Amino acid sequence: MPSPGEDMSSSIDDALVSARQALGALLQRHGATNAALEADLGALLGERMNGLRNLAARLGAMEDMSLRMTGERNADAMIGVFLQAAATILDCACVAVCLLDSGEQRVRHLAARGVDSALLAARALDAHQLPGALLLQPLALRLQEGAALPDGHPAVHGFLGLAIRDRNHLYGWMYCARARGAAPFSHEDERIGVTLGAQLAVAYENMGLYEVVQRHAAQLQLEAAARLQADRALRDSEQRLRLSARIFESTQESIMMTDAMGTIIAVNPAFELITGYSEAEVVGRNPRLLQSGRHDSAFYRAIWASLATSGQWRGDITNRRKNGQVYPERLSINAVRGAGGAIDAYVSVSSDISALKAAHHQVDFLSNHDPLTLLPNRAVLVERMQQAIASARHGDRQIALLLFNIDRLQRINDSLGHEAGDALLREVARRAGMLAGPADALAHLGSDEFVLLLTECLDSDAIIVAVRRLIDEIALPFQADGHELIVTTSVGISIYPRDGANPSELLKAADVALSHMKDAGRNGFRFFKGEMNAHALRWMALETHLRRAIERKELSLHYQPQVALASGRMCSMEALLRWNSPELGQVGPGDFIALAEDTGLILPIGNWVIREACMQNKAWQDAGLPPLKVAVNVSAHQFTAGTVPAVVREALRESGLAAQYLEVELTESVMMRDSEAAETQLAELTGMGVSISLDDFGTGYSSLGYLSRFMLDKLKIDQSFVRNIISDPRSAAIAQATIALAHGLSLAVVAEGVETVEQLAFLQRIGCDEVQGYLFSRPLAADAMATLMASDARLTLPPPVGVLPKE
């Protein structure tokens, strides 16, 4: 639907056409000599008509603004509508509005467009400076230059300001400003501005009235709710009288009422159920018939004294049922006073807390015992250890702490379910308990971990006998869901005072000994030794330093060349991780790689290795060195995480290295963990153009199925075979068979650990493709590797001889 402004503009256009037609007819009657007059009059008429169209558009915009402000119920939103419309209608760069509260003394809303309203805050009510001085202006203030606005205000060429008021109220002020170079405000602009101010005053007044109406409506709602609540309270009071009788009859608490002399006058059904007495048996009698004999006369005198002074007594009491059973009760007695203040009656409400007391005992037991085996937990064990240590200290005796658990209990849980595992733990607790002496202590620390504290140990032989009996007892067959199970146990032993002076030290020492027993193969025992703790402390310190190694840039890569036997030239290299710690010195890979895998640090370290190798190889190529392939070792943990393709892709993108110059080395353990996931990732790497090699072939659970299933490019013969390839016919046969197998699958073969000319000659004779080892070069730092690459060194190969080692 067109706005009134659009309708007026259309009417003006129609009038302009009619006027032009009438003017043309008039001029035709006066002859063609009036053509110039026709042009001048037409231009004047067109100019006036354009002014009328502009006025019509502004009127339409004001009407639209008025409708939008009327629909707003939020002052900030309404002012926002006004600012946007005023800026458009008056074609100004800055518009500001200040609205006062109902007392006309404080600023309630201050907003601006094209200028920061914070600049205007200090002068908003200042009667001597603009814009606050507008509040005292009876008429609109129109300035072309010299508007003294606050510092920081954008420069203006034209200023139009006025107070926003009606006959009875002053609502605030508004002003518009045009930037330098714009036309000054006209008289027509002033009239438009006054109209805009009047519309804002109406909208603001309407909003105030709306708020008043809303407050009155809210008050009416509150009054209606209060009346409704009063009516409900009256109905509830009547209902409560009916419910009181119902509660007396149906409550689970025993209720007894007596007169002022203590004679029973009424009891409820719960009293009859709890005590066994019927109402007819107790009415007219004294409550002392429930006395259990467990309390003396002073106890009952204290009850009566409390009733006399405070009118109430609360506490636990032991009473006796009709059948003679004694039971605990939580009792509350209140005195009922009459109008004169004298006690008319007593009302007692009580609960049988027999079940509650039993539950408390159960909670106390479970807080100190394991709910599965019912054995004492760690807190009780520590307390008993402290007692045993104190006793042993005075008696100059030793104490043995046996920390043991079930080997591979998880297999039973996975195959037969946790119910079978729980049954096994209960049986272990029973069997171990049979071996514990009266002064010993057996505890379950959680999961499959138990502790047997031996307090009467004469010597180490006695401890060994006890440990062997424990291991043999647990190894006896066990039946679970129709399955006969035989389990083994590992035991770590610490001795007081040799291995610790308090429970914490003894438990730690036994735990360290247990860890060493597991590392040694399980199903046995170990005594704690000082060097075990030193090793554990070194392992922990090593982990702490390793966590900081990446951020401290302590890790580096060395590169060992791989030489093609066909040409004797270096064809690729393997990136090898090195760690030089300022505190620990040079740490061997054998020490920290396994630690990194155990702690999960292998993921960030492995990602760094891939990225660093790509960066370095690309830097060598950019320096003009011959492009060679670099191989990086990827841990099985990285493949398990499933992030290897993404890490490789990002490293190639970031470094700019072509995928053909990167090779990923993996071990057979990668394929054994999750072969499907590994296969998917290897396929993705191959799709990128990255080469895949299988490292340490033959040292693990080698499977021909892996070789046919996975996308591989190269096999690496482990150095353990190469080392004995000349002296051991079996190693020679394995190497020869591996090369034949690899070539049959179109795989290249690399021999690691080549250190002698004889090894090199033999590998050349059996068709090995590439070699790697100290014979050609040790692993080199990046700068030394660059020097070697630039020298184009070649390996001198022995003449081929077709003779294999003899057995």
Image: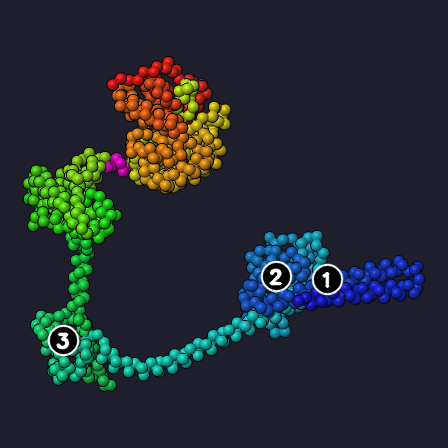
Q: How far across and how far down the image is residue 374, in percent?
A: 16, 54
- Magenta-span inclusion, residue 10: no
Q: Which residue is mark 1?
A: 54
As drawn, is 469 to the left or to the right of 753? left
In space, the residues marked 2 and 1 are separated at their CA atoms by: 20 Å
- Where does the N terminus fall, quadrant-wise? bottom right
Q: Are marks 1 and 3 in contact (CB under 8 Å)?
A: no
Based on the picture, tell me whether residue 540 belongs to the magenta stretch: yes
- Nearer the observer: mark 1 or 3; the answer is 3
Please name the amino acid that badge 3 sits on.
Thr
Three-letter residue code for mark 2:
Leu
* Residue 617 appears left or right of 195: left
Label 1 crowd (10 A; few <14 / some 14-19 / many >=20)? some
Q: Which residues are magenta?
A: 536-541
Left or right: 90 in relation to 676: right
Choose the circle earlier in sequence order: 3 or 2: 2
**Res 83 label:** 2
Q: Which residue is mark 3?
A: 275
Q: How far across and how far down the image is residue 801, in percent? A: 35, 14
Q: Is residue 806 visible?
A: yes
Taking depth in this image into account, of 775 and 109 the one nearest to the observer is 775
| Colour logic | rainbow
Q: Quadrant of the image for the C terminus?
A: top left
Residue 136 seen: no
Q: Is residue 203 left or right of residue 489?
A: right
